[in-house]
Image (cartoon, rainbow, N blue to C red):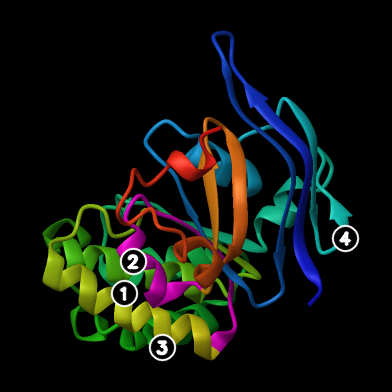
Amino acid sequence: MKPLLVARNLRRADSAREIFSVDYFSLNQGETIALIGPNGAGKTTFLLTLALLHQPTSGSIEIDGVTAGPNNLLHLRRRMAVVFQESLLLDMSVLGNLTTALRIRQAPRKTALARAQKWLDIFGVGHISSQQARLLSGGEAQRTSLARAFALEPDLLFLDEPFGSLDYPTRNSLLNDLGKILKQLNMTTLFVTHDYTEIPFLAEKTAVMYEGRIKKCGSNQEIFGHDFFQRNLWSPWAD
């Protein structure tokens, strides 16, 4: 498979510490990788750096063979969408949240309306398109946030623990729906989670991050075939 995203010698540090240092990481076209690790491992910062929302201290990121830099950041960012644990919806209607995002990306008004309604329907919230976002339940808000991301028709999707604030039944329902959509679209996705039970719904490959390093990356069978269900989850790669 052709790599859509490639990071080389990527590092980010602040004045106090190094947050992550990754020699090589790639996402192939149509691939979904789950990124797991303990709190403080650097998962979210790594994701935001790959999504071109944080600037690396050093290293390079290539999107479809094009190296990201000051002259093309906006263009490359418009090939991506990011969904966070908090839905971060605007204080307007559900439909307005999607059409506003599409209009910012220069979609004609008629196209924006049609595409927004299509994705709200796919995620099961089309019937509340006129409702104000601030009145939504947690599950409705996250479905709206995901619909907004998919309406942008990104080449790359980044998910940062998008189910962390949801109750168990709501989370499972959304995981099932999202997993089916990702497979149907063959969407290239990086999915950060602290809950490895979410991984089989969305990803067939997992990368393990520990203390800012990717210690192992492989198929779910390769990663979860280890005996860490009976041991500390992170000990096999902590050395």
**Tag 4 and tag 1, C-beta contact below 8 Å:** no
**Tag 1 and tag 2, C-beta contact below 8 Å:** yes
Determine whether the residue tagged by mark 4 lies in a helix, strand or loop: loop
Give the residue pinned by disc 1: 175
Image height of 163 relative to 123, above or below? above
Q: CA distance from mark 1 to mark 2?
A: 7 Å
Where is residue 52, by image quadrant? top right
Residue 62 relative to residue 56: left or right: right
Residue 232 vs residue 57, the one in the foreground: 232
Instruction: Point out the tag, 2 or 4, that comes first from the N-terminus.
Output: 4
Instruction: Point out the tag, 1 or 2, that comes first from the N-terminus.
Output: 1
Q: Position of residue 182 (x, y in %)?
A: 49, 80
Q: CA distance from mark 2 to mark 4?
A: 31 Å
Mark 4 residue type: Gly
The residue at the point 66 percent across, 59 percent down is: 78
The residue at the point 44 percent across, 81 percent down is: 113
Q: Which mark is residue 153?
A: none
Instruction: Point out the tag, 4 or 1, that comes first from the N-terminus.
Output: 4
Taking the magenta stretch, the answer to whether it contains residue 199 is yes
Give the residue pinned by disc 4: 65
Q: Which mark is residue 118?
A: 3
Residue 128 relative to residue 71: left or right: left
Q: Which mark is residue 198?
A: 2
